[in-house]
């Protein structure tokens, strides 16, 4: 069976959930080979093996941390040359998509971004994408070279399938352009205790209807009762009510949770582009004609200042 390269998203060897989803999808089209860059490969290997990695290609060098994405592209190109894979899978993060695009250019291959499903086909892997505000699903395949595919988080439930997970060192030669952009400082992100927005199974977002930074407390209270991440529309972010790091939409982050709750969000196409692949969408808006209701599975026409606190209380009550 052909091998499939899976780029490992991790923090010092702690493997993040999107990678486990990629390993699950990779098993549908071949044997997963994980590519772990940076420190912590020995720590990550057990987890990667548990979810199906037949081997782990590991490389650790200062360039991966000290410079932007080019050294990682160099490493993935080296892995590609060593394995000759049937496909290369990466998470659909901002970094993942940039690495994927650069790699596809280098190896002369086609690229598919933001896939939400993956299956084997007679002529290569077939990726499903959700397009036009989730009105349509498309199935595509790359017709030139080795498919490079990025997959949105929460597109598949991680499934264990223990494999060898043998760690092998990957020899990487860095090109002249790999040190073109240096990281000069880092500021640790303040922890909110909530899940990462792009990986969360549940997201609660607030929009213009929240009507002020101080009122986001009711959105946060609902999110905390559900163990959810907090998002915001562009209107709320532009007004200074919530940080840009929490913006959901075309110019913010793209999310695909199991449950998305939109409170006081009208549903402009810019916002819909960032959450349209959510599995179940619930909207709370006092305007019955709001465009968001065209997209939702469940809609509540009402004042969010009345509905959201009641919903929070009900969730807490059911949790006991």
Image (cartoon, rainbow, N blue to C red):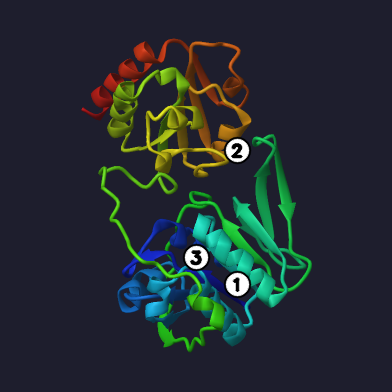
Q: Earlier in the sequence, mark 1 or mark 2?
A: 1
Mark 1–mark 3 distance (CA, rounded to whole Å): 10 Å
The residue lying toward the viewer, choosing from 206 and 148, is 206
* Residue 50, picture quadrant: bottom left
* Residue 150, picture quadrant: bottom right
Q: Which residue is mark 3?
A: 23
Q: Which residue is mark 1?
A: 30
Is residue 238 visible in the rendered image? The answer is: yes
The residue lying toward the viewer, choosing from 275 and 208, is 208
- Near mark 3 (Cα within 10 A), the count class, few <14, some 14-19 or many ≥20, is many
In the depicted structure, whether residue 264 falls above or below residue 220 = above
Q: Nearer the viewer, mark 1 or mark 2?
A: 2
Q: Nearer the viewer, mark 3 or mark 2?
A: 2
Q: Which residue is mark 2?
A: 273
Mark 1–mark 2 distance (CA, rounded to whole Å): 31 Å
- Near mark 2 (Cα within 10 A), the count class, few <14, some 14-19 or many ≥20, is many
């Amino acid at each position: 069976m052909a091998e499939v390269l899976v780029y490992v998203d991790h923090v010092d060897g702690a493997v993040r959930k999107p990678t486990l989803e990629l390993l699950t999808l990779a098993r549908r089209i071949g044997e997963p080979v994980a590519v772990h860059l940076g420190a912590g490969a020995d720590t990550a290997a057990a987890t990667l093996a548990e979810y199906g990695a037949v081997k782990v290609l590991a490389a650790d060098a200062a360039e991966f941390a000290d410079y932007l994405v080019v050294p990682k592209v160099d490493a993935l190109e080296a892995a590609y040359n060593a394995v000759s894979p049937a496909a290369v899978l990466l998470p659909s993060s901002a970094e993942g998509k940039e690495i994927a695009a650069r790699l596809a250019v280098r190896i002369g291959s086609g690229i598919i971004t933001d896939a939400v499903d993956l299956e084997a086909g007679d002529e290569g892997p077939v990726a499903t994408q959700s397009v036009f505000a989730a009105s349509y699903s498309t199935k595509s395949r790359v017709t030139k070279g080795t498919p490079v595919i990025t997959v949105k988080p929460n597109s598949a439930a991680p499934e264990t399938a223990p494999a060898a997970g043998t760690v092998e060192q990957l020899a990487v030669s860095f090109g002249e352009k790999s040190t073109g952009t240096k990281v000069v400082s880092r500021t640790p992100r303040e922890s909110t205790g909530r899940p990462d927005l792009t990986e969360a199974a549940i997201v609660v977002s607030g929009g213009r209807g929240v009507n002020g930074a101080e009122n986001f407390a009711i959105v946060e209270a609902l999110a905390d009762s559900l163990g959810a991440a907090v998002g915001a529309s562009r209107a709320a972010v532009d007004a200074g009510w919530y940080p840009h790091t929490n913006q959901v939409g075309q110019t913010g982050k793209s999310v695909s949770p199991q449950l998305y709750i939109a409170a006081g969000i009208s549903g402009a196409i810019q916002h819909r582009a960032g959450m349209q692949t959510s599995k179940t969408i619930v909207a709370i808006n006092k305007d019955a004609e709001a465009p968001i209701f065209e997209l939702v599975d469940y809609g509540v026409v009402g004042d969010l200042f009345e509905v959201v606190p009641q919903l929070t209380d009900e969730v807490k009550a059911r949790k006991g």
